[in-house]
Image: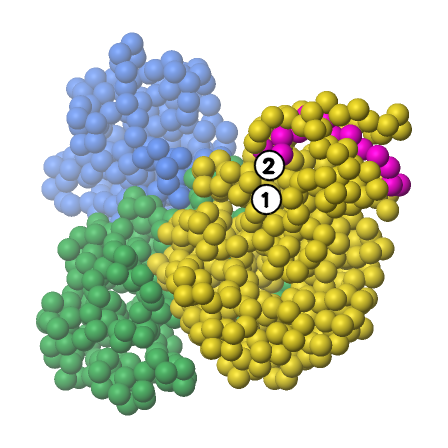
Chain colours: A green, B blue, C yellow
Amino acid sequence: MKRHLLSAADLDRDDALLVLDTATELATVSSRAVRKLPTLRGRTVVNLFFEDSTRTRISFEAAAKRLSADVINFTAKGSSLSKGESLKDTALTLEAMGADAVVVRHGASGAPYRLANAGWISGSVVNAGDGTHEHPTQALLDAYTMRRHLSEGRGDLADRRVTIVGDVLHSRVARSNVLLLATLGAEVTLVAPPTLLPVGVEDWPCEISYELDPALAKADAVMMLRVQAERMNAAFFPSAREYSRRYGLDAHRMALLPDHAIVMHPGPMNRGMEIAADVADSVRSVIVEQVSNGVNVRMAVLYLLLGGAQLPTGEEVAA
Amino acid sequence: MPASQHAFAATGNDEQSTPGDRTVLDAGEIGRALTRLSHEILERNKGAGDVVLLGIPTRGVYLARRLAERIATIEDEAVPVGSLDVTMYRDDLRTRPARALLPTEIPDTGVEGRTVVLVDDVLYSGRTIRAALDALSELGRPRAVQLAVLVDRGHRELPIRADFVGKNLPTATSERVLVLLAEHDGRDGVVISDRGGDA
Amino acid sequence: MTGTYLLRGGRLLGAGDPVDLLLAGGVIAQVGAALSAPADAVHVDAAGLVVLPGLVDLHTHLREPGREDAETVESGSRAAALGGFTAVHAMANTEPVADTAGVVEQVWHLGREAGYVDVHPVGAVTVGLAGTRLAELGAMAGSAARVRMFSDDGRCVDDAVLMRRALEYVKAFDGVIAQHAQEPRLTAGAQMNEGALSGVLGLRGWPAVAEEAIVARDVLLAEHVGSRLHVCHVSTAGSVEIVRAAKARGVDVTAEVTPHHLLLTEDVVAGYDPVFKVNPPLRAKSDVEALREGLADGTIDAVATDHAPHAAEDKDCEWEAAAMGMLGLETALPVVAEAMVATGLLDWAGVADRMSVRPAGIGRLAGHGRPIAEGEPANLTLVDPHASTVVDPSRSASRSRNTPYAGRTLPTAVVATFLRGVPTVLGGRLVADAR
C-alpha cells in the first residue's frame, strides 16, 4: 500500500487507469462555471520547490485550489547542497505546519524518497520532479493526453507507439514515461545519440534507436525532450547545430509521421534546437493541451492520495 | 480490486444479495412503483415541460432513465435525463479510502431555471442528497429541486425528505437494503439483508 | 595495569587442540596444554574461542584533528579495540591535513594517550592533498610517528609524474604509496556505481573504469621504477584482474578490500538512504564475487575497513548532499566471517593472514601480525565463532552512527583483545582503563 507517488513504477495498471479515469471525470469540472470542488477542504498541500519550475508549481497549485485545499508555497532558494536550510529541517517545519501532502521538486535524485521514508513527515509525498530521476505526474499527464487523442479517452494505450527523442540520460520525464507507458501497454522507442542514453538502457522496457527518421514513420506520438545547449560543453554532442540536424523535429521530419500522430513536448521548449517553431505551433502539436491536462491529472492524484481515509503508515516500497 | 495492492484504494459501490435475504419488492412491484412515480412527477409539475431528471450513480441513473421512458410514453415528449456524481461533495470521504469517481452527465439543456428531479435508489441518512444539492448548486441555479427515490428506509440524519417515494420501508439500522436492477444486477428486486452496513 | 593473564582452552587460529596461553611482561610467555599460572594471574576462559593475532587495519579515518564531532583518536581507538584491532593506520585527510611531521606526531601522541590500539599515522603524499607538490615525506618518515605509508586517500594522485616521483622517493625509507584509485574526470559528480541501476535511479554513474584505469597505470609505474605500491579499497572485478596479472609479473603491488565491498551490493542504493553512500561506491554482485575470490586466493592481501565516521547532519539529508563513507571497525570481523568464513572461502588462519599478518607487513609494523608463539608480543584477539552480533548503531563506540548494517545480525563476536599483554576488551566490553 503506497501513500506516496514517488515513481511511475509505484502505479500498476489499475492504479494508472484509476488516475486517468478520475482525471477524465474531473475535466468536466474544469470546463464549467464554478471550477471548485469542496473535496479537500481543511487539508493542507505544501508545494515545496527547491528548483524553479513555475509551470509545475502553478499546475499543482491550481489543482489543489480547485479541490479547496489550503495551499502553501514553499520555495527554498537552495538546498543543503548550497548551504541553505537542510531538507530535514525544511521537512520538520512543514510537519509542524500540519502538511497533509508535500509536493516536492528537488534537484537531487531521490530527495522525495528521503522525505517519504526518513520519518521526518507523516503526510503523503508527491514527486514533482527529482534531479535526473523521475517526474511521475508529467508522465500521467502525457499518458492522459495520448489517451485522449489515440484511444478515445478510454482504457489503456495498448499497442500505441510512442517515440521519445532527446536527452534521455538527464531526463526525469523520459524515465517516468518509459515506466508508465510500459505499464499501459504502449510500445516505446527512445531516440538519442549514444552519449545521451544511460548505461543499462537496453534493460528498459523499450526499444532504442540512434536514428530519428526510421522511428517516425510508425509513431502514434512523438515526444521531444528538452536538450540544454550546455551539454555540448561536456562533449555529449559536438554542437547545437549537429544535434538539431540529427535529432531535431522540423517540418520536413514531421511530414514522415502518420496523419493521426501527435507531437508532444514537456516544456520548456528550446525552439530551433530540439523542435522547430513551426512544428511546435502546428495543428499536430498538443503541447499547450498538455499543460491544461496537467491540472486535471494533478487534481486526480491529490484527490486519490488525500481524498479518502489516511492510509496507515507502513512499509514503503522503494522503486 | 483489493485495496491493499494499489497505490490508490478506490472502492466501488457494488453490492450483491446472498441467500437468506428477504425480498420486499419484486420486479412487477418496482415497475408499478416507477409508473406511479412518473405520474406523480408529471402531476406535481403540470407536465414534463421544464423537468430534468438527474440520477445519482450507480442505480439512480438507471431509475432516472426508466422514469424518463415512462414519462415519454405518457406525455409523448422526451425528458432530458443525466447523471450527477456526488462523490467529491460527500462529508464522509475520510472514513474510507478514496473512491473512484462516477460519471456526471448534464443534459445539453443544463439545469439553469429548470425543475431538477434528483433520482436515487434508497433514501437513508440524507447525506447523499445533501451532497447532491451542493454539487447541483455549482452547476447552475435550478428553479426547483425535487427528489424521487425508489425506497425510503427512514433513519434520516438531516432535514431532508423525498417528494416522490416508491415505497416506504421501515427498517432497523442493522439491516441493509439492496436495490437490484436488471441493467446492473441482472434482475429487478429490493431485498433486505440483516448483515449490517450502510446502503 | 600490566599483569599476568592465563587464557585457557582457546584454539590457535581456530585449529588444533585447545591450548593455554600465559601472557606476561607484554609477551606470550608460554604456550601449552594445562599450563600452571602464578597465583596472581588473571584467568580468562577461552574455551570454544578462536585465538587470532591482533587485527591490523590499514585504512581508518579517525577525523582528528579537525572533525572531532565525527570521531576522535580516542573514540576511534575504542571502536578499533572492540573490533579486535591492536593497530590501525590513521588516514591523512584531517584538518589540517597530516602532511607534516608535526601533524603526524600529534596523531601518534593522541593514539599513545588513548592506549587502546597502536595508532600509526598515514602521511599525505601531496601538500594539503592538493595533488600538486610532494609533502615532506622524509620528515614524516623520520618523525616519532615513523610513517611508512603515504596516501592522499579521499583523493587520487592522478598526476602521473607526481605519482611516479612519490613511488620513487619513498624507496629511500622503505615507504609505500597507498593510492586511492579514482580518475577524477571520469567521476565528476559521481554518486553510485555506473550500471543499469544508476540509470534507473537517475544518479550519476561512477564507472569501474575510473578505478581500473588508475590501478593499471600505477602498477605500470611501480613496475617501471621498481617501487612498492599499495592499492586502497579495490572495488571492481577489473581491478582484481589487473592486480592479479601485475603480481604474476612480479610487480611489488599489494591491495586491500573493505568489508562492505565484500558483503554489500549496489542494490541497497535503491532507497536513496545515504548510509549506503561510500567511496568507492558499492558495486555489482559480480564485483563482490570477484573481490571475495581475489581475497581468498591472495591477490588482495588485506581487509581494510575504510572506517569513515560522519556526523549525523552529513548523512541525514538527500543522497547527493550526503558525505561518502561508512563505519567499519566494530563490524569488520563479523562481516568478513559472513562473507569469507561462512562461505568457506577463508579459514581462520586465512583471516589472520589477511587481517593481521599481511597488513602488518605492508605497514611495516614490527610488533603486529606475528605468530602466536612464545616470546612474541602479546597482541591477540579472541573470537567466539558461534556467537552472533546484532548491529545497534546507538551502542557503537564511535562518535558517529553511519553503519550500513544497522539491525543486521552478523556471525561471530569479538570477546577479548589484548595489546602487548594488556586487555583492552574483555567479555566483549571495553576495559575501563586499558593504560
Q: Taking the image as drawn, is residue A310 in sight?
A: no
Asked if the magenta segment contains residue A86, the reply would be no
Q: Position of residue C60 (x, y in %)?
A: 66, 58
Above or below, C218 relative to C277: below
Q: Give the range drawn in magenta.
A: C1-14
Chain label for disc 1: C
Q: Distance between the residues labelled 1 and 2?
A: 7 Å
Q: Which residue is drawn at 53% across and 84% down?
A: C161
- Disc 2 element: loop
Q: Residue at position x 17%, y 53% from top? A: A158
Q: Is residue B189 at all visible to an observer of this figure?
A: yes
Do discs 1 and 2 share a chain? yes
Above or below, A101 against B179 in this view is below
Instruction: Determine the chain carrying the residue at label 2.
Output: C
> Badges 1 and 2: C-beta atoms under 8 Å apart?
yes
- Indicate which disc residue C13 carries: 2
Q: Which of B36 and C104 is in front in this view?
A: C104
Q: Quadrant of the N terminus of chain C?
A: top right
- The residue carrying mark 1 is C352
In the image, residue A288 lies at what x, y percent?
31, 73
For image coordinates 72% across by 22% down, the residue present is C34
**Residue B53: numbered disc:** none
Closest to the observer, C321 or C327: C327
Query: Looking at this view, is C229 or B48 the one in front?
Result: C229
- Residue B66: x and y, percent? 19, 34
- Residues A228 and C370: in front is C370
Q: Quadrant of residue C45?
A: top right
Relative height, residue A240 to residue C62 (above, below): below
